[in-house]
């Protein structure tokens, strides 16, 4: 028998010796991978393991697939999964985000093989907790909102962490997990926010209850420093004028609006889409009651088409709103409305979701029954849903830059419970809270996230930039400071939906807004600029 000299395992055979591989295999192991590359996956290693991340923090896991000989199998496509999403979540690329303190296993799977890593989630060390505002007042039976910002020992804000709220005297004031303080009886209570052993507090003085007759509604732009059941007026924080920093961000987004093809790529022959989202009132005012082309000539779309100032060609106005599609039906990315818009509104016109760059959003809930200042008021629920909608918008419309919100029109003539007063008026407060939540968050560097409305960070693409469109509410025939009034003839017989005359009024307000606003002129009008 002829002896065969077996080389050391690290020996790399030249091409001429590849014919000897069957012989070499008899010497105790095949050459790694063989001439046809690595074999099937038999093992997946996930590292680091264990890995430690903080709540609201993130870390990156890496998966490596190997065959039976230990050779790396390149190009493997992994499916990632967290064993407990309440402790940690994981993306399709293996990025882990801490949700709550605890421990879980995160796995990567490919080719029927699974490997895992232990992930430990801990509370980030806290240096301070600041409650904003540091003191406030609230009437008995009314609600005031407090926010807390947590910083680490070096003073750096910790974004996304959840504090625990408490009141030192629940007979005076109670506080919810979201920081909503309700006055119970007159006196003073200390409201405390805590995180990982560190606390901050604010003094809240509870006054006698408000006395407000039903006819005392004042439009937000005229209410100013006054209060509605304890809630301040104005459209923006302390003013009807957009804050300078928010305006600067809006101008940056406005100047980034360019025509795009159906794949979202900038293209001189592409389109800029301005779209409506909402329910029956929205579609009537934007286009037509029956939500399909052609739009009525007196609607916003009809008025814009007849206005020589409005761009044509690469600019297109589309109607995504539809009767009955209330706020709760636009919240999630898989809500049927989004596929309806894609397949029945955009596609027949040769348009696509990636061309949508601006949206007018006007939504409400059907049949609300709880008004302010109750902590379960419809206005709070509406603000929460609008926050969700804005984040969903960025998922469905990746090139969306700007969203303009409007409140309901006057509903004091309503003869049905669909959405009467005070809910139409209070929808304006909900929009105010949403806009101001983004302003407040971005002023904090993105870290002060409103616990009710959620993350509205536009710098990382979580949400689009949002601001007021035209504010539509006025107290019936009582003229607003700018002259806006609502007459019975502006409403249909139900007192809720606009008549043709009411649609003309809203359409005109929309045209006026889009042709004059500094954040819309450059993409809405011919020759307009966004300075």
Image (cartoon, grey):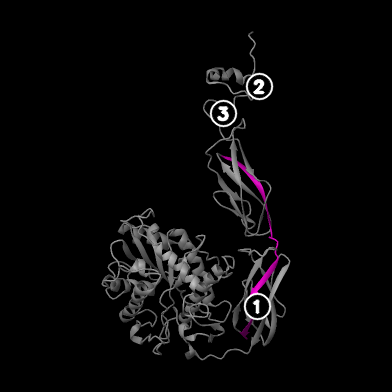
Q: Nearer the viewer, residue 241 or 6?
A: 241
In this rendering, position of residue 97 left or right of residue 233: right
Would you place residue 1 above or below residue 62 in this image?
Answer: above
Q: Secondary structure at mark 2?
A: loop
- Identify the residue at horizontal 33%, vertical 78% (top origin): 508
Q: Which residue is mark 2?
A: 8
Gap in angstroms between the C-alphas marked 2 and 1:
73 Å
| Residue 170 seen | no
Q: Quadrant of residue 20?
A: top right
Q: Which residue is mark 3?
A: 33
Magenta part of the protein: which range?
112-140
Q: Position of residue 315 (x, y in %)?
A: 32, 63
Q: Quadrant of residue 360?
A: bottom left
Q: Residues within 10 Å of mark 1 (few under 14, many from 20)?
A: some
Magenta stretch encompasses residue 187: no
Pointer 2 with pointer 1, Cβ within 8 A: no
In this rendering, position of residue 336 left or right of residue 46: left
| Residue 357 seen | yes
Q: Secondary structure at mark 1?
A: loop
- Identify the residue at horizontal 37%, vertical 55% (top origin): 266
Would you place residue 117 above or below residue 161 in this image?
Answer: above
Q: Position of residue 338 (x, y in %)?
A: 42, 61
**Label drawn at residue 134:** 1
- Foreground disc of the pair 2, 3: 2
- Foreground disc of the pair 3, 1: 1
Q: Which of pointers 2 and 1 lies earlier in the amino acid sequence?
A: 2
Q: Which of pointers 3 and 1 lies earlier in the amino acid sequence?
A: 3
């Amino acid at each position: 028998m002829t002896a065969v000299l077996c080389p050391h395992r690290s020996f790399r055979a030249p091409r001429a010796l590849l014919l000897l591989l069957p012989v070499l295999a008899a010497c105790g192991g095949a050459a790694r991978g063989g001439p046809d590359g690595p074999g099937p996956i038999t093992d997946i290693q996930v590292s680091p393991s264990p890995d430690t991340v903080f709540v609201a923090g993130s870390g990156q896991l890496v998966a490596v697939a190997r065959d039976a000989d230990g050779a790396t199998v390149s190009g493997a496509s992994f499916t990632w999964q967290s064993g407990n999403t309440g402790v940690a979540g994981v993306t399709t690329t293996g990025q882990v985000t801490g949700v709550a303190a605890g421990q879980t296993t995160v796995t990567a799977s490919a080719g029927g093989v699974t490997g895992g890593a232990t992930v430990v989630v801990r509370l980030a060390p806290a240096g301070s907790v600041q409650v904003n505002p540091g003191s406030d007042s609230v009437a008995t039976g009314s609600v005031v909102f407090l926010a807390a910002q947590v910083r680490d020992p070096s003073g750096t804000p910790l974004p996304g962490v959840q504090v625990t709220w408490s009141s030192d005297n629940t007979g005076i004031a109670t506080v919810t997990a979201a920081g909503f303080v309700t006055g119970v009886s007159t006196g003073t209570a200390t409201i405390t926010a805590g995180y990982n052993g560190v606390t901050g507090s604010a003094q809240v003085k509870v006054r006698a209850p408000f006395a407000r007759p039903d006819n005392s509604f004042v439009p937000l732009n005229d209410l100013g420093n006054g209060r509605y059941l304890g809630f301040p007026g104005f459209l923006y924080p302390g003013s009807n004028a957009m804050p300078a920093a928010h305006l600067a961000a809006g101008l940056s987004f406005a100047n980034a609006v360019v025509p795009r093809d159906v794949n979202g790529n900038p293209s001189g022959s592409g389109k800029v889409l301005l779209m409506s989202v909402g329910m029956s009132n929205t579609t009537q005012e934007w286009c037509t009651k029956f939500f399909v082309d052609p739009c009525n000539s007196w609607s916003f779309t009809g008025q814009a088409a007849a206005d020589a100032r409005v761009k044509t060609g690469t600019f297109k106005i589309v109607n995504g709103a539809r009767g009955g599609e209330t706020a709760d039906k636009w919240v999630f990315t898989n809500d049927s409305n989004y596929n309806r818009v894609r397949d029945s509104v955009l596609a027949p016109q040769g348009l696509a979701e990636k061309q949508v760059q601006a949206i007018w959003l006007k939504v409400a809930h059907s049949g609300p029954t709880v008004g302010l200042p109750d902590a379960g008021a419809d206005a709070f629920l509406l603000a929460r849903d609008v926050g969700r909608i804005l984040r969903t918008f960025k998922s469905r419309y990746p090139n969306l830059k700007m969203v303009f919100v409007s409140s309901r029109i006057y509903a004091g003539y309503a003869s049905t419970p669909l959405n009467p007063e005070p809910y139409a008026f209070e929808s304006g407060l909900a929009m105010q809270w949403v806009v101001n939540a983004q302003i407040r968050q971005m002023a904090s560097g993105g870290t002060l996230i409103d616990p009710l409305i959620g993350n509205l960070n536009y710098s990382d693409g979580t949400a689009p930039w949002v601001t007021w469109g035209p504010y539509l509410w006025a107290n019936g025939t009582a003229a607003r400071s700018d002259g806006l009034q609502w007459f019975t003839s502006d409403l249909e017989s139900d007192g809720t939906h606009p008549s043709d005359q009411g649609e003309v009024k809203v359409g005109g307000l929309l045209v006026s807004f889009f042709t004059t606003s500094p954040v819309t002129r450059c993409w809405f009008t011919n020759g307009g600029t966004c300075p």
